[in-house]
Amino acid sequence: MSGAMPMRPEYNSEAIQLRKRIAMLLSPGLLWLLVFFALPMFFVLRSSFDSFAGGVMTSDFTLQNYARIFTEPLYIQVLFKSLLTGLFVTVSCLVIGYPVAHLIARSTGKKRNLLLIGLVIPFWTSLVVRTYAWKLLLGTNGVVNYHLMQLGIIDTPLRMLFTTGAVVVGLVHVFLPFMILPLYASIEKLDASLEEASQDLGANAVQTFFKVTLPLTLPGVTTGCMLVFIMTVSSFLTPDLLGGAGNAMISNIIQSEFFGTFNWPFGSALAISFLLFSLLFVAVYNKFFNREQKG
Amino acid sequence: MTKFDVELDNVSKRFGEFTAVDNVNFKINKGEFFSLLGPSGCGKTTLMRMISGFEAPSEGTIRISGKDVTHDRPYERPTNLVFQHLALFPHLTIAENIAFGLRLKKLSNGEIDRRVDEMLELVRLPGLGNRKISQLSGGQKQRIAIARALVNRPAVLLLDEPLAALDLKLREQMQLELKRIQSEIGTTFIYVTHDQSEAITMSDVIAVVNKGKIEQMADATTIYEKPQSAFVANFIGETNLLEGEIASINGDATVVVVEGVPIKVKSVAGAHVGQKAHVSVRPEKIIFDAIDADSCNHFEAVIDNAIYMGNYTHYQMHLGQGLKLGIDVQNATHCERKSIGESVHIAWSADLGVLLPGEVQ
């Protein structure tokens, strides 16, 4: 609607009323975000231009922190490794999660409720506790090694903890529900007779999946992948507990700058760079998939 | 080669305790328009899903074109189904929808294009191939769903109440359209419906299904004029279903006493005096007249209600102690209509009623 269009006065006042209501309803949330998100982010941004020498932070306006990120190979390597881990975890979650989501969506009544409850039960336990459980399982004297040695399959314990593999397994475990839930929502909306129609027209189960089910549940796939990828790349606890120093991801590096070397300006610069990179990634991803869906 | 396209031998289907289909047998001739007609929950949809392969029978054999397909998967059968809600693929264009089955058969692009165009011609929507499904009207979607199934040249086309969602005018138009398509290509159609007028309009053979069993299988005229059970008489069209006891059987003439009123009806085999029986008389068979002949039922009745229906008037009346009858009279001329409370003479020929011995379950 064009702004130059003349409006009847009563319509106009209705519009103003509506706008007032919207503002009122949004204000608590906006205030919260302003104080606890926008303001701190601004301080981080400001701090990323400060200088740091001999353990002392100085208010400044320098780009040297950013220059360091791109000149020292370590940070690009961590970034690259985090992205690769993200990709691997996302694909694993998709491959494992899709059949589960399909099963839940196509079951009915009590069975479906039980499966859904099973899906959210892990959320009732703290992530720290669940991650420590993986340590017990994967450790040198852990449950897995013990049984493998008892069965005589191996002689010396396998090194499983503090490997990239352990991080990936831990992350898949944590983020799988975030893949399954949007997939479930998408598959549940899909009319089962579309899959039957495909079979009736001569497609076997595999062909039906790739020609009908997957294309029509793509919104769930893109949402799930986006969620899992972003959360994996920015994960902190799992790589910290299961990966150790050699498998640090971006958040671990940022944390060590803030609380290890106390180089807040550089930590801030890492945080800002990573944030920008994530936004760029999301923008590209959205553009690609929006185009896909418009056909 | 058998002359039957579809044969069901002693087919039953149970879901737990519930028997959805109970020992059904039938054979469908090649090129026939066959309808499965029955109320919802009667088992007709289960029958159809077993023929198309989405359900396996608990017992019995299903043969299509002479080949046992009882345990074949849906994609292995020479059948195609037009779904109740059509199930067109929303992510594909019209042409891609129709080509779906052909692509799976790995036909050449030229052949696929040719057959898709041929189908669009058949359903009278030429040149719409590049449209999206969402751009079509209800009737157009119907036609595309039929085209998508028929393009695969199935031995049998199954249709699961595909017209139920259309409004009356469009539905009538599509019924004629379906009949035209069927006679043009000569494929066997199995049409599942709960709408008796739909079945009567289109079918060569109607199987009336009730509680998992086939009550009667015949052409539309026989089903309507000579129902074999009270259920069929009642389900197909309107009827006066009069319940009484057989008082006498004299050659061709049987008398059933209904609420004290003797009703003359043509005899049937297997009936005996003293047996409970129904007489079914269609409301349009009864006329206002005072014929007094041996072969006729003739009564005096009092009109309780007169409902003007446009092309005819429906009269409700009672005779004797309270036997109620309904009569339909065509509003052919400016003839005087009867009014409520009026005493009238009615009559119908004994052979227009149908004697149905035995009690209704």
Image (tube, helix red, strand yellow):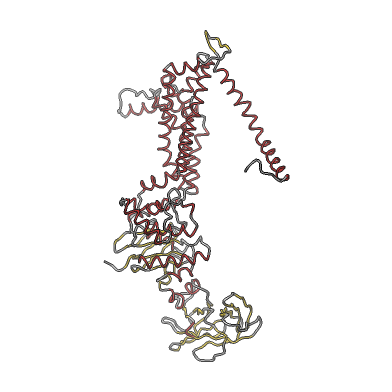
Location of residue B132 with respect to B202 vertically, above or below: above
Residue B58, picture quadrant: bottom left
Q: Position of residue A102 (x, y in %)?
A: 44, 44
Q: Position of residue B284 (x, y in %)?
A: 53, 80
Can I make out residue B14 in this image?
no
Asked whether A265 or A106 is in front, the reply is A265
Residue B73, picture quadrant: bottom left
Specify the farthest residue to the top.
Answer: A54
Which quadrant holds the C terminus of chain A?
top left
Q: Position of residue B106 (x, y in %)?
A: 31, 50
- Left or right? Give the position of A262 relative to B341: left
Q: Position of residue A8 (x, y in %)?
A: 71, 46
Specify the farthest residue to the left.
Answer: B1
- Left or right? Give the position of A280 relative to B183: right
Asked whether B80 or B63 is in front, the reply is B80
Asked whether A220 or A66 is in front, the reply is A66
Asked whether B261 or A263 is in front, the reply is A263
Can I make out residue A77 in this image?
yes
Location of residue B13 with respect to A125 vertically, above or below: below
Residue A245, picture quadrant: top left
Q: Residue at x 57, y 90 (%)?
A: B290
- Left or right? Give the position of B130 relative to B240: left
Location of residue A84 with respect to B263 vertically, above or below: above
